[in-house]
Image (spheres, helix red, strand yellow):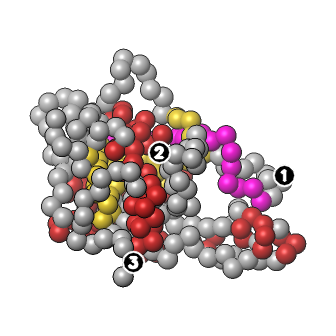
Amino acid sequence: MKKQKIELFNDHFQNYKVYGIPKAQLVIADIPYNLGNNAYASSPKWYKDGDNKNGESELAGKNFFDTDNDFRIAEFMHFCNRMLIKEPKEKGKAPAMIVFCAFEQMPTVIEYGKKYGFMNSYPLVFIKNYSAQVLKANMKIVGATEYAVVLYRDKLPKFRNNGKMIFNWFEWKRDSSKIYPKIHPTQKPVNLLKRLIEIFTDEGDVVIDPVAGSGTTLRACAEMNRSCYGFEIKKDFCKEAKEKMLSNIMIQSTIFDCSEE
């Protein structure tokens, strides 16, 4: 069994050559949803103390992140094409990508995937028992789903279903805050990521998260004996991920760390 490695780099994924990381069996990425100035539009945070009677808060008309506008999907797809293992001759061992995105983004993700060799895809749907769209919830149906696209080149990717049929929808259950700290506003549940990793990889495989955020993908891999390499350009998120989400996991030192300057 290969030695497990969990590494988080405070850097842009475009700079991956600096680190000499191995190619992956699976890429998991939660790309920016391009909500722009409407990021808080369905959240009480848009208003002071969560009450519209108090007027708008400082978050009204603001992005979640100032880096969202800088995300280039073509660069992302190029990175993924380069960093996934080559298509193997054997069946049942091909790599895959799982890209979390907004429903409206799915055609764009699929289109750009094809430009970079990922000719095949299928959707995943995640069903919540809660909704972030709490404003005007008494006036309209609120969203309680998340979406992702599975992308692959030619052969069907590695699939570990233990003889059971797996549907294209999954329950989205919030993690216990006592076990997994809340760090990022669009943080994905560790247990959900563990389920996806379990399906598309084996122990000892490599997973890459190019936009690691809170480090949940790395935490999921660490708990499942997969090596994982993550990139997070925002220093604050990287620092919190290391100090909270990954604090009990051995993280190798990197050229670009997340410590205070």
Q: Disc 3 or disc 1, which is closer to the eye?
A: 3
State which tag comes first along the sequence, 3 or 1: 1
Task: Return the x and y of residue 88 as percentages of the image width and height.
Answer: 14, 38
**Quick check: 18 above or below 88?**
below
Answer with left or right where residue 244 lies relative to residue 255: right
State whether residue 84 appears in this view: no
**Disc 3 target residue:** 260
Magenta region: 118-135
Crowding near the residue tagged with mark 1, few <14, some 14–19, many ≥20 C-alpha atoms within 10 Å = few
Task: Return the x and y of residue 29 as percentages of the image width and height.
Answer: 39, 54
Where is the C terminus found, in terms of image quarters?
Answer: bottom left
Residue found at the far front of this picture: 248
User: Marks 1 and 2, how far apart in space?
Assistant: 31 Å
Type of amino acid under label 2: Val
Taking the spot 56% from the left edge, 61% from the top edge, the residue there is: 185
Q: Secondary structure at mark 2?
A: helix
